[in-house]
Image (cartoon, helix red, strand yellow):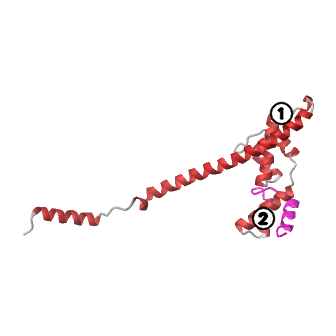
Amino acid sequence: MESRSTRNSRNNNNQNQGKTKKPFYKKWWFWILVVIVIVIFGSTQSHGNSDKEAKTDSTKSEKVDKKSTSSNSSANKVPADYTSALNKAKTYSSMMHMSKQGIYDQLSSDSGEKFSAEASQYAVDNLKADYNKNALEKAKSYQKDMSMSPDAIKDQLTSSYGEKFTEDEANYAIQHLND
């Protein structure tokens, strides 16, 4: 005959075998937490890098602008927001290889830099950029990173929802893609 304590311990063991606890890393809430942490960490890293790069570029641009504005008369003084827009435009062109229209849209967008239309226009008008080269760099990126065909790349380069390069700039990029 079994004692009551032996029966109770056997019942507890049977109950425990039916309800084994999952390790925490196999629970759904853990993976949601991991995804949230990765997204937050990734977004702070990308903003931090672009801010550092933009600061470096704007510091270089400010030095050049200070030299050039010191030689100009005060009658030709450019508003500070126009100069800031031009500095941002230089960054977008040199680092992100954007089109003229793409830069203007980014500078003037409410979800972008929020510069006035006048400051944005001043920036793209005074930006000394090689838009053929920018289109080519974008095309190479699409070819390498996304394995896109030349026709698809051209469509992306000229799309009003894409890069917004001109037909001539896109044609230049496609012609020199494999050079």
Asked if the residue under mark 2 is in contact with the one under mark 1, i.e. CB atoms within 8 Å, the reply is: no
Residue beneath the point at 92% across and 34% down:
71
Q: CA distance from mark 1 to mark 2?
A: 37 Å
- The answer to which quarter of the image holds residue 6 is bottom left
The answer to whether residue 67 shows anywhere in this view is yes
Badge 1 amino acid: Pro
Is residue 10 or residue 166 the one in the foreground? 10
What secondary structure is found at the residue carrying circle 2? Answer: helix
Residue 41 percent location from the top left of the image: 57, 51
| Whether residue 13 is situated above or below residue 33 in the rendered picture | below
Residue at figure coordinates x 82%, y 70% from the top left: 178
- First in sequence, mark 1 or 2: give its number: 1
User: Residue 143: x and y, percent?
Assistant: 75, 67
In the rendering, at what x and y percent does residue 87 appear? Answer: 80, 43
Is residue 73 rendered to the left or right of residue 108? right
Is 172 inside the magenta-drawn segment?
yes
Q: Is residue 2 above or below residue 71?
A: below
Q: Which residues are magenta?
A: 158-179
Q: Is residue 69 left or right of residue 42?
A: right
Q: Which mark is residue 140?
A: 2
Helix, strand or loop under label 1: loop
- For label 1, the residue is 79
Dividing the picture into quadrants, the one containing residue 38 is bottom right
Mark 1 surroundings within 10 Å by alpha-carbon count, few (fewer than 14), some (14 through 19), many (20 or more): few
Q: Residue 161 has which mark?
A: none
Binning the other alpha carbons within 10 Å of mark 2 as few (below 14), some (14 to 19) or many (20 upward) gives many
Q: Quadrant where the C terminus lies? A: bottom right
Q: Is residue 119 visible?
A: no
User: Amino acid type of disc 2?
Assistant: Lys
Residue 87 within the segment the image draws in magenta: no
